[in-house]
Amino acid sequence: MLLTASVTKAELVALIDGLTPMRVEIDEHRGRSITLGRPEVSLVAGRGLRLRGDGRVVWDVAGVAIPVTVQVWQVLLVPRVLSRGRSHLLSLEPVIEELDLKLVPGFLDWKIADAIREAIAQHREKIAWDFARTLSKRLPLSARIDPASLFEIVATDGEVEVGTNELRFGVRFEARIERRAGAPVPESEQEPRSAPVGSARAVAR
């Protein structure tokens, strides 16, 4: 069973607009942070979601806070489906493509850039959705049904595709009926007690 969802560029823009402007802590103890303005959003076919905008960094030198203007920042969010044991994740891996700091001394430029990259790397795990945990369900059927059974649907894998106008995410499911312990055994014991319920294809827009 394959369920495919399509997310349009307009829907992604609305989502990003709801998240930005946003502030990201670089070093909470030293009060370092970066505030990102509302970015331009574009889809790069076969690659991911590109965000481009400006921002502001608060940095400290010898305990003195120094505001730094970010002329341009550009990040590519690369969607990937990852499997970790029984977990299946849709992850958006951030890749910094451009970071232009305005009027920053050379000895600070690389330090700020490295700190921003490290902060993004630390938040990398948070830009992920365990869709197997969310979408897998195990439901008891009515006790009036004989023999009493359970219906189980499990998300087993996924795939993601980026086009110029939409992002498509597909999830594969396995569905089965499982008899509860103590339920009567069918006459044809040679048949498996748990069997797939069939296959279908649904498209959600």
Image (cartoon, rainbow, N blue to C red):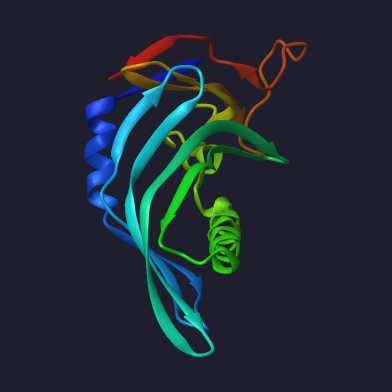
Extreme bottom residue here? 63
Vertical placement of residue 155 versus 107, above or below: above
Q: Quadrant of residue 51?
A: top left
Instruction: Where is residue 95? Give x, y as percent.
Output: 55, 41
Vertical placement of residue 152 versus 101, above or below: above
Q: Nearer the viewer, residue 164 or 58?
A: 58
* Residue 110 visible in the shown view: yes
* Residue 151 visible in the shown view: no
Identify the image quadrant of the C terminus: top left
Vertical placement of residue 135 versus 196, above or below: below
Q: Residue at x 45, y 88 (%)?
A: 64
Instruction: Where is residue 150? Give x, y as percent.
Output: 53, 33
Q: Nearer the viewer, residue 142 or 73?
A: 73
Q: Is residue 43 left or right of residue 130?
A: left
Instruction: Where is residue 13? Give x, y as percent.
Output: 25, 36
Q: Is residue 113 left or right of residue 87?
A: left
